[in-house]
Image (cartoon, helix red, strand yellow):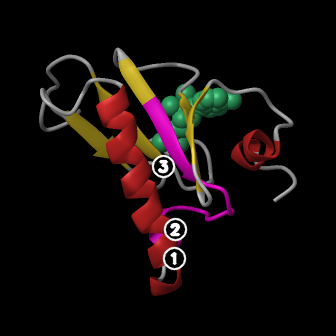
Amino acid sequence: MTDCIFCKIVAGEIPSTEVMSSERTLAFRDIKPALPSHILVIPREHIQSADTLTPQHAATLAEMFDTAQKVARQEGLSERGYRLVFNVGDDAQNSVPHLHMHVVGGRPMEWPPG
Ligand code: AMP
């Protein structure tokens, strides 16, 4: 996708603060962190959102969760806990149409979200 901001980050055309990289995924710091630790894990391939996932994406999705676990450990979040979030659509305030998992933590969080 030529006009996708996260595809441009994958291609190195837009800078990002990389946290972790794997064959199918990339993890980088959110430009506007909502919590002390806020990392985005994305697939290198363009997938629109969690709403368009199919069984064909199974390996990519598994690798996204593997990367998220490693990121959480690296950030020191595993013991106290963290949240993994996929926003889908307008009501969830999804703003970037390239699948991404928010890995957030570093302080106690509210539930349910507002
Ligand atoms: P969402 O609202 O779930 O679509 O999340 C998109 C996230 O991407 C937001 O938290 C933004 O702050 C973040 N974001 C947008 N542009 C960039 C960028 N260039 N580098 C890092 N994070 C970004």
Residue that label 2 marks? 60
Residue located at (48% from left, 82% from top): 54
Residue 43 appears in the figure:
yes
First along the sequence among labels 3 and 2? 2
Residue located at (81% from left, 32% from top): 14
> Which quadrant would the N terminus be assigned to in this image?
bottom right
**Decide: marks 3, 1 in contact (CB < 8 A)?**
no
Residue that label 3 marks? 90
Mark 3: which secondary structure? loop
Quadrant in the rendering for residue 71: top left
**Decide: marks 1, 2 in contact (CB < 8 A)?**
yes
Relative to 104, say whether 50 is above or below. Answer: below
Circle 2 Cα neighbour tier, 10 Å, few/some/many (<14 / 14–19 / ≥20) = some
Residue kind at label 1, given as amino acid type: His
Quadrant in the rendering for residue 106: top left
Residue that label 1 marks? 57
Residue 18 horizontal side relative to residue 63, left or right: right
Label 3 to label 1, Cα distance in Å? 23 Å
47 is within the stretch colored magenta: yes
Mark 1: which secondary structure? helix
Circle 3 Cα neighbour tier, 10 Å, few/some/many (<14 / 14–19 / ≥20) = few
Residue located at (61% from left, 63% from top): 48
Residue 16 rendering spot, x and y as whole percentages: 69, 27
Q: Nearer the viewer, mark 3 or mark 2?
A: 2
> Which quadrant would the C terminus be assigned to in this image?
top left
The stretch in magenta equals: 39-52
Mark 2: which secondary structure? helix
